[in-house]
């Protein structure tokens, strides 16, 4: 992932089998505020 401030984040993960999986991401800013969002990852 690349962010607007030029920083990058890497969270390597390997799924064991094809399918659709929920992926939850939580971001926290410098003031301690956080947001969580869940996405669907489709693995062929």
Image (cartoon, rainbow, N blue to C red):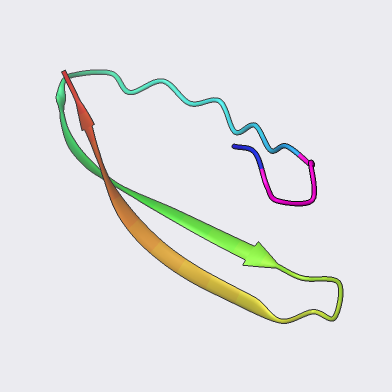
Q: Position of residue 23 (x, y in %)?
A: 37, 48
Give the magenta part as a residue range. 3-7
Among all residues in the image, which is located at the extreme front?
Answer: 4
Quadrant the C terminus occupies: top left
Quadrant the N terminus occupies: top right
Task: Name the one closer to the observer, 30 or 7.
Answer: 7
Q: Position of residue 17 (x, y in %)?
A: 20, 18
- Residue 26 is left or right of residue 21, and the answer is right
Q: Position of residue 36 (x, y in %)?
A: 49, 69
Q: Is residue 18 above or below residue 4?
A: above
Task: Characterize the magenta stretch by its predominant secondary structure.
Answer: loop
Q: Residue at x 33, y 23 (%)?
A: 15
- Residue 1 is left or right of residue 24, and the answer is right
Q: Position of residue 29 (x, y in %)?
A: 77, 70
Residue 25 included in the magenta stretch of the image:
no
Q: Residue at x 41, y 20 (%)?
A: 14
Among all residues in the image, which is located at the extreme right?
Answer: 30
Q: Which quadrant of the structure image shows residue 37?
A: bottom left
């Amino acid at each position: 992932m690349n962010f607007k401030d030029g920083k990058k984040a890497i969270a390597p993960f390997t799924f064991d089998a094809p399918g659709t999986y929920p992926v939850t991401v939580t971001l926290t800013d410098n003031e301690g505020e956080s947001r969580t969002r869940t996405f669907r990852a489709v693995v062929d």
